[in-house]
Image: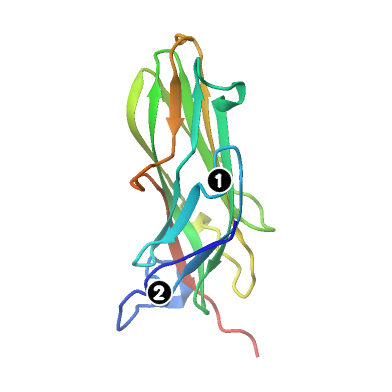
């Protein structure tokens, strides 16, 4: 699936450039667009994930419509684990590069007493080392919205190499363990949304690229 979603340009008359190319949250003033190059996984069939850049160019969001792992009498044996792999082309203005400073994950879970669930994710630039998976665990009884945030220390942020073309890969997994819970009851964890209100938010960190060598 190839789907281009553009954000409105940030209306600014001036922009503060971080001194010396230091990382910051001040985005470039021009359009940022994201192309979904490929989408794979048991939790995101084609057409069930949408990507959009925030109006202020400081983040982008991923919204899923069928991303749920479950166990119980109506669940298939493979439903206990769902995953989604996105390959994105992030188009930023010339002279800037980006990394991810933090990520906010949101969803809903219903876990019977004795069951557990987890959400884990990582992301990396194509052809570069993968970041470690970060995991968040939940235990029943629980029936509510859930939210988790992964933050990267400034010194550890990985930036897209200036002057190169490397796609951005996101891997996300949801998993439910029935444990000692009542097998006649359903437990699930989801990251999907029918109204667009539940989304994963990736916050950009920006740097100014050095001028190309003559």
Q: Looking at the picture, does residue 190 appear above or below residue 55?
A: above
Q: Which residue is mark 1?
A: 122
- Crowding at label 2, few (<14), some or many (≥20) Cα neighbours within 10 Å? some
Q: Quadrant of residue 65?
A: top left
Closer to viewer: mark 1 or mark 2? 1
Q: Distance between the Cα atoms at labels 1 and 2? A: 27 Å
Residue 36: horizontal and vertical position, in percent?
56, 59
Residue 38 placement, left or right of 187: right
Residue 75: horizontal and vertical position, in percent?
53, 21
- Crowding at label 1, few (<14), some or many (≥20) Cα neighbours within 10 Å? some
Label 1 SS: strand
Residue 13: horizontal and vertical position, in percent?
30, 83
Judged from this view, the residue extending furthest toward the bottom is: 214
Give the residue drawn at x 64%, y 64%: 166
Q: Looking at the picture, does residue 81 appear above or below residue 50?
A: above
- The quadrant in which the C terminus is found is bottom right
Label 2 SS: loop
- The quadrant in which the N terminus is found is bottom right
Q: Which residue is mark 2?
A: 18
Colour scheme of the rendered structure: rainbow
| Observer-nearest of 85 and 157 | 85
Residue 143: horizontal and vertical position, in percent?
33, 24
């Amino acid at each position: 699936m190839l789907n281009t979603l553009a954000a409105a340009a940030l209306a600014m008359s001036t922009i503060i450039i971080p001194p010396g190319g230091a990382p910051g949250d001040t985005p470039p003033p021009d359009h940022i667009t994201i192309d979904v190059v490929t989408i794979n996984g048991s939790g995101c069939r084609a057409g069930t994930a949408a990507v959009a850049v925030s109006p202020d160019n400081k983040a982008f969001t991923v919204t899923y419509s069928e991303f749920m792992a479950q166990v119980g009498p109506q669940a298939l044996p493979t439903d206990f684990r769902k995953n989604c792999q996105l390959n994105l082309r992030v188009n930023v203005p010339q002279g800037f590069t980006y990394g991810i400073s933090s990520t906010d994950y949101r969803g809903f879970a219903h876990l019977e007493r004795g069951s557990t669930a987890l959400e884990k994710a990582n992301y990396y630039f194509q052809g570069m080392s993968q970041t470690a998976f970060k995991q968040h665990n939940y235990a029943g009884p629980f029936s509510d919205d859930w939210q988790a945030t992964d933050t990267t220390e400034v010194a550890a942020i990985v930036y897209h190499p200036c002057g190169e073309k490397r796609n951005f890969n996101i891997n996300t997994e949801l998993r439910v363990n029935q444990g000692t819970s009542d097998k006649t009851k359903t437990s699930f964890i989801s990251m999907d949304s029918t109204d667009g209100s539940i989304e994963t938010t990736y916050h950009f960190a920006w740097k100014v690229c050095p001028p190309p060598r003559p």
